[in-house]
């Protein structure tokens, strides 16, 4: 019985101690040590498409046809489209060849819906760029369109430009698109306009002209400005677990995020296969957003 009474007494003492009031005295005339601004910051990690499809302003998904499960992931091909792997960039060798479908009532081309749709604003400018060539020499014409996939006929087209590709050497071409309407889920559409011709396309890109600070290959203006307005003393990048990857081969390698963006190799995203209830087989890192 003695242990029982000892436990009972201890409980009573604890309850009595818990019931005692506590107070804190603060002297506002005597501030403590200054807290440096560098003690506060923000943390960025590419989760939930936070980089590609988020802060990085590129609107085209799988722009270099390098996704390993299928080089045409993110694209819808129609007509005669062939994926090849002897392109001009050694670390991103894939490209597509568009050829005449061989019928006057058929077209050859590609659609890209971006990351859950390409959001465009009426009157804003979007820079389309592509590395291209005509393998047999001569010239060929591409029709580059921003379209509304939910509309019918000619009402699908928000804007269109024609781009002439000339010569058998790889060169970069650009046109600026200005949609007539605002749409949250537009698609980029590329048609082969000429008959009896073939065109090769590599690193197909679409960026808002008005990026944050006006940088080409830059950041989405609204998101970057929101982070800047927090006035962080430190910016932790590229994240936490994403740095380690799922193994040594998929760890974040900052050296792959520098140099010409066309030749930055694709890497698997750490959050692609991590959880069985959040499975994103098409989640990669383009390294467009880097150092």
Image (cartoon, rainbow, N blue to C red):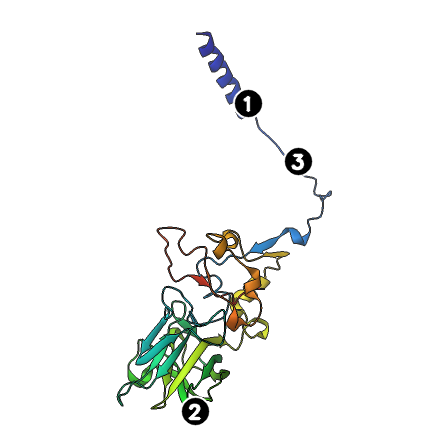
State which quadrant residue 139 falls in.
Answer: bottom left
CB contact under 8 Å: marks 3 and 1: no
Residue drawn at x 41%, y 90% is: 140
Q: Which mark is residue 139?
A: 2
Reading the chain from its start, which is encountered first: label 2 or label 1?
Answer: 1
State the image coordinates of residue 274 (x, y, percent, origin top left): 41, 51
Q: Can residue 267 be seen in this view?
A: yes
Task: Work out how far the residue at label 3 is from the one at label 2, CA to CA, in angstroms.
Answer: 82 Å
- Numbered disc 3: secondary structure: loop
Up-down relation of residue 9 to residue 181 (above or below): above
State which quadrant residue 137 falls in.
Answer: bottom left
Residue drawn at x 70%, y 40% is: 27
Q: Mark 3 against mark 1, which lies toward the viewer?
A: 1
Callout 2 environment at 10 Å: few (<14), some (14 to 19), or many (20+)? some
Q: Residue 17 carries which label?
A: 1
User: Which residue in the protein does label 3 denote?
Assistant: 25
Up-down relation of residue 69 to residue 130 (above or below): above
Task: Work out how far the residue at label 2 is from the one at label 1, CA to CA, in angstroms.
Answer: 90 Å
Residue drawn at x 70%, y 43% is: 28
As drawn, is 31 to the left or to the right of 66?
A: right
């Amino acid at each position: 019985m003695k242990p029982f009474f000892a436990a009972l007494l201890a409980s009573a003492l604890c309850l009595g101690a818990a019931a005692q009031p506590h107070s804190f005295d603060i002297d506002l005339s005597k501030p403590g040590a200054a807290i440096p601004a560098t003690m506060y910051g923000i943390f960025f990690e590419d989760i939930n498409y936070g980089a590609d499809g988020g802060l990085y302003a590129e609107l085209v998904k799988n722009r270099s046809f390098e996704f390993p499960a299928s080089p045409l992931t993110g694209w819808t091909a129609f007509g005669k489209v062939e994926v090849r792997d002897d392109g001009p960039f050694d670390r991103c060798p894939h490209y597509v060849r568009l050829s005449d479908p061989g019928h006057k009532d058929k077209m050859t081309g590609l659609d890209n819906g971006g990351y859950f749709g390409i959001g465009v604003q009426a009157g804003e400018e979007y820079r389309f760029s592509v590395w291209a060539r005509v393998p047999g020499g001569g010239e060929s014409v591409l029709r580059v369109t921003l379209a509304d996939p939910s509309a019918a006929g000619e009402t699908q087209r928000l804007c269109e430009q024609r781009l002439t590709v000339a010569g058998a050497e790889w060169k970069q071409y650009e046109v600026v698109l200005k949609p007539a309407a605002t749409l949250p889920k537009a698609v980029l559409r590329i048609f082969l306009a000429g008959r009896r011709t073939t065109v090769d396309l590599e690193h197909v890109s679409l960026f808002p002209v008005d990026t944050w600070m006006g940088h080409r290959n830059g950041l989405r203006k609204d998101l970057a400005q929101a982070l800047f307005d927090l006035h962080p003393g430190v910016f932790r990048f590229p994240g936490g677990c994403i740095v380690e990857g799922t193994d040594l081969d998929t760890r974040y390698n900052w050296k792959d995020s520098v140099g010409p963006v066309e030749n930055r190799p694709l890497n698997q995203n750490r959050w692609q296969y991590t959880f069985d209830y959040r499975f994103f087989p098409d989640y990669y890192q383009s390294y467009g957003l880097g150092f």
